[in-house]
Image (cartoon, grey):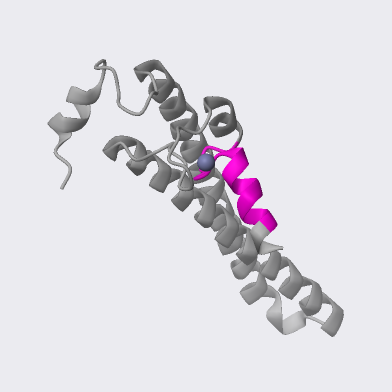
Amino acid sequence: MLVNGAVVAGKGASTAKGRSAEEFEQIRVILQGRFEDLDREYEEAVAQNTRLRLVEIGDAAGDDQADSGSKTAERDAATSLLRTLLDRRTQAEHALQRLDDGTYGNCEGCSNPIPVERLEVFPSATTCVHCKQVRERRAS
Ligand SMILES: [Zn+2]
């Protein structure tokens, strides 16, 4: 669907929906940085997880109950960390894709551009603060 040329051609031209090319570039740098951080953390967590499993296999024979219990907890924590990191990495990746196809950064509620200050803090945000509050009020 996306041709490389189309993305490059959008650069420098003033972008639609009231956001400047500089802002897009700023957001892209933030998102890309976040994605790389998460990617690195995820790879580290995977390596850590593998080590835990190897230790577990090696030690299993000599374990008493308490030992194997704390190892299970450790492994569960590692697994849930992996899941969280993978989730966040997917979100950042998704945001980068939306940035490329021009749908990124507009509120899903009111379709106004989400302020860049908000995106800096929450790069994966899909609504402006106002719409988020409205949603939360409806939900509660
Ligand atoms: Zn909104």
25, above or below 7, in the image? above
112, above or below 57, in the image? above
Front residue of 96 and 113: 113
Q: Residue at x 35, y 42 (%)?
A: 98
Q: Residue at x 26, y 15 (%)?
A: 12
Taking the image as shown, residue 79 lies to the left or right of residue 27, namely: right
Q: Position of residue 7 (x, y in %)?
A: 21, 31
The magenta span reads 122-137
Front residue of 74 and 21: 21
Q: Is residue 41 visible?
A: yes
The furthest residue to the right: 66
Asked if residue 58 lies in the magenta stretch, the reply is no
Taking the image as shown, residue 78 lies to the left or right of residue 6, namely: right
Q: Position of residue 92 (x, y in %)?
A: 46, 44
Q: Position of residue 112 (x, y in %)?
A: 45, 35
Q: Position of residue 59 (x, y in %)?
A: 70, 75
